Amino acid sequence: MDKIEIKGYKSFKDLTLYLNPINILIGSNGSGKSNFLSFFEFLNRMYEQKLTEYVAISGGVDKFFFQGSKVTDTIYANIKFQENSYLIELKEGDGKFVLSKECIGYNDDYYEIGHFNNESNIKSYNGLQRGDYIKRYLSEIKKYHFHDTGKSSPFTKESNITNDVYYLYEKGENIAAFLYGIQQNAPIVYKRIVKTIQSVAPYFSDFYFNVSTSDTVRLLWTDKYSSTVYGPTDLSDGTIRFIALATLFLQPNLPKVIIIDEPELGLHPFAIQKLSGMIKSAAAKGTQIIIATQSADLISNFNAEDIITVNQINGVSVMKRLEQDSLNAWLEEYTLGDLWKQNILKGGQPL
């Protein structure tokens, strides 16, 4: 994605933002970071033709309009993928969203593929060739969320070694089968994932894949000091999250876009440094990264152009990318994290 325009969505009245390979959002609580990330989840549910269900579960259409449907009656978005683009307009109709316009574009030439439907047509569209490119891109835009690490978290679930190996699910519930598939089909990558985990958790030895008669596995592991087989609840919250992050960013077939909220949660500063390296590595391989963070340690590992400040001004979320040239003098003695904590960066101040 090169450019995104959003109008009338949640706290965004009229946003135009150019996107880089790495995009790290910083800002106080309530500034709009999570709202921006949620737009991609909204977009993914629309692509999967599950928008009506998603909106109903999320509290209804009124929660998605900027300041409610009494103030805003249309959500507009235009996502640019180099010369290609995907444009949508949504209105409310009988308590549901109606796509009043859905278009694919090449440069500034748009072709309408549907209107006045409750669900998108792009997934089933079989017309112009540019539609295939846009479909492939939209299908890989997923927002990941690895915060739940409790006794009944997604990481404790069984997953199938036949059906659940194609891509990592958004909450990591198929991580055992996904890792098993990497071990079987890309052993070099698998060893890299294990070594990266060991660099943060030195006691960790390897994963233990005990495939059941129904072809399912759970996330089991062994340590270097005993023959005991452990489960995910035997890991600290930070370690299980780091395992999920290492699997996501080091997988052999990276998605086109990785979107994740506060990946640093519960991580040791050394693990945050490792995470930064994985983010840069994935971006160098062509994956676009969009992250929201509250961590000064994380942003200190990146360039100013990778950072986007998010502020809410009079109820409107405003996003602006930092400029390296304006900060060079400061960065000779301080890190970006230092400048953020000292309120020297213009915008995006933490609480």
Image (cartoon, helix red, strand yellow):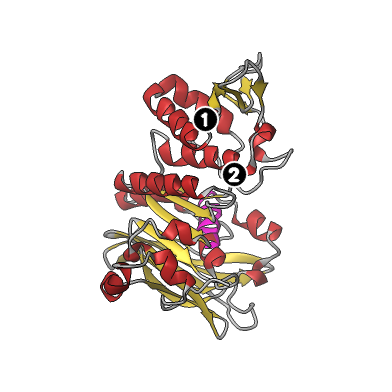
Q: Main secondary structure of the magenta part?
A: helix
Please tell me which of labels 2 and 1 falls first in the chain: 1
Residue 156 placement: quadrant: top right
Residue at image location 69% in from the left, 68% down from the top: 95
Q: Where, quadrant-wise, is the C terminus in this rendering?
A: bottom right
At horizontal 32% and vertical 72% (from top left) the residue drawn is: 330
**Residue that carries the numbered disc 2 in the rendered image:** 238
- C-alpha gap between disc 2 and disc 1: 20 Å
- Please determine whether, in this image, residue 32 is positioned above or below residue 201: below
Rendered view: 227 above or below 231: above
Q: Is residue 45 magenta?
A: yes
Which residue lies at the image location 45% right of the left edge and 68% below the top edge?
77
Task: Using the rendered image of the protein, determine whether residue 290 is visible from the camera's viewpoint.
Answer: yes
Residue 67: x %, y % from top left:
62, 79
Residue hosting label 1: 178
Magenta residues span: 38-48
Asked if residue 256 can be seen in this view, the reply is no
Who is closer to the viewer here, 51 or 121? Answer: 51
Number of the label disc, if any, that sits on residue 220? none
Q: Nearer the viewer, mark 2 or mark 1?
A: 2
Mark count: 2
| Amino acid found under the numbered disc labelled 1 | Phe
Extreme residue toward the bottom, this view: 314
Q: Position of residue 102 (x, y in %)?
A: 45, 63
